[in-house]
Image (tube, rainbow, N blue to C red):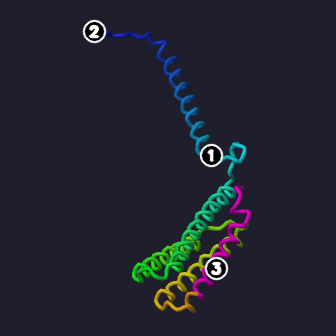
Amino acid sequence: MKYDIELPQEIIPTLRRALTVVLTLGAIVALVFLGKSVSPVDGKGKPIILSPRLAQISAYQRDIRRWASNLREIQTDLGGLLSNPNANILDMDEQANLLYGRLVNLQAEVDGTSVPSTLEVLHTSTGDAVSASLTATLGVAVWISEPTSENLHSAENALSAATEQLDGIYQNPWVQEAP
């Protein structure tokens, strides 16, 4: 059995146009759904139209929040080292070195980031907070290598100063709110 379907030649251009219209509409619908799924929204669920400047500020806010979270985690770990003086000294040294390495990487990332001009002061504060955490980490390392009460007190003071710097970043409205 042979099934040959013959279409009249005058219908073929019409079918091609209809297929083109259907495919075009399908592509438009797909792009609309894709746009809705990846577009940022405000508190009311309405899409935010991002200009290049607003997109840069939004990206920088995400970076600041991530950096602040990393700093909080590192500072918590430093506090844990200071609160456990009877831990294995080699384990403490290794953890302090890992935390120091994370801070050095974080400092490089902060320094290498493009900053919107309106957020330059916040960027400077973030760099200062990372530097204060590096100082605290060095204080903890000194205490690990020579566990005296004076070194412990110095490390605790440095960590407290670093925590205050970080708290100042969290109080900044640019860190708390979306643009």
**Dot placed on the residue nearer the N-terminal end, 1 or 3:** 1
Discs 1/3, front? 3
For the residue carrying disc 2, how many other residues have a C-alpha within 10 Å: few (<14), some (14-19), or many (20+)?
A: few
Q: Is residue 23 above or below residue 46?
A: above
What's the mark number on residue 39?
1
Q: Position of residue 55 (x, y in %)?
A: 65, 56
Disc 3 element: helix
Disc 1 element: loop
Q: Position of residue 148 (x, y in %)?
A: 52, 92
Label 2 – label 3 distance at C-alpha: 87 Å
What's the mark number on residue 2?
2
**Dot placed on the residue nearer the N-terminal end, 2 or 1:** 2
The N terminus sits in image quarter = top left
Q: Which residues are magenta?
A: 153-179
Discs 2/3, front? 3
- Identify the amino acid type marked 1: Ser
Q: Is residue 124 visible?
A: no
For the residue carrying disc 1, how many other residues have a C-alpha within 10 Å: few (<14), some (14-19), or many (20+)?
A: few
- Identify the amino acid type marked 2: Lys
Quarter residue 117 falls in: bottom right
- Identify the amino acid type marked 3: Ser
Determine if the magenta segment contains residue 80. Answer: no
Q: Is residue 47 above or below residue 153?
A: above
Determine if the magenta segment contains residue 168. Answer: yes
Disc 2 element: loop
Label 1 – label 3 distance at C-alpha: 40 Å
